[in-house]
């Protein structure tokens, strides 16, 4: 995964249950990158003032139709990178996230 690549496609932000040592209510945004056949997911974990971003990749096992998550090791706490900013600044993503925060 090239974290400096341009975003090719961004999906609709959706509620996501993230399970670690603790279970979090999170937001997930699927995306793909230019010149990369893989699919990725940006997971946004909000804890009061802290925001954490995780990027996972989806792989495919031969003979299986269901993709499985692969941890890319890209984890950012209270900071972003240009790739995450491209996704978060997308006008459609902004409108969905804004609706979500105003309806809460």
Image: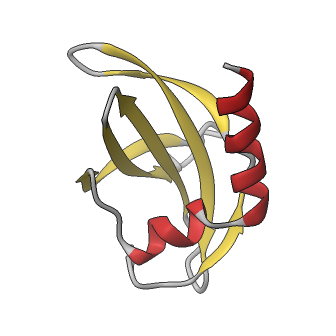
Q: Residue at x 40, y 34 (%)?
A: 45
Foreground residue among 36 and 47: 47
Judge left or right: residue 72 versus residue 42: left
Q: Could you tell whether 10 is left or right of 67 in the image?
A: right
Task: Please state the total of marks drawn on the protein image.
Answer: 0
Residue at image coords 70%, 54%: 94
The spot of residue 88 in percent (x, y) is 57, 60
The percent coordinates of residue 78 (x first, y second) are: 27, 51
Judged left or right of residue 88, residue 82 is left
> Residue 97, located in which quarter of the rendered image?
top right
Residue at position x 70%, y 42% in the image: 98
Q: Nearer the viewer, residue 37 or 53?
A: 53
Check the picture and name the quadrant holding the C terminus: top right
Q: Where residue 83 sits: x, y (%)?
A: 46, 73
Going by the image, does 30 lie left or right of 2? right
Where residue 80 sits, quadrant-wise, is bottom left
70 over 35 or under it: above or below: above
Against 14, is 21 above or below?
above
Q: Residue at x 62, y 60 (%)?
A: 31
Q: Quadrant of the N terminus?
A: bottom left
Q: How is the image coloured?
A: secondary structure
Q: Quadrant of residue 82?
A: bottom left
Q: Is residue 102 above or below residue 32?
A: above
Name the foreground residue: 11 vs 101.
101
Residue 11, how many percent across, how many down? 72, 53
């Amino acid at each position: 995964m090239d974290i400096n690549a341009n975003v090719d496609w961004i999906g609709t932000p959706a509620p996501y249950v993230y399970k670690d040592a603790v279970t979090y209510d999170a937001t997930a945004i699927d995306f793909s990158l230019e010149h990369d056949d893989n699919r990725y997911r940006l997971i946004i974990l909000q804890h009061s003032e802290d925001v954490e971003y995780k990027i996972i990749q989806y792989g495919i096992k031969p003979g299986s139709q269901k993709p499985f998550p692969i941890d890319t090791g890209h984890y950012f706490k209270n900071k972003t990178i240009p790739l995450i900013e491209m996704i978060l600044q997308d006008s459609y993503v902004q409108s969905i996230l804004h609706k979500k925060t105003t309806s809460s």
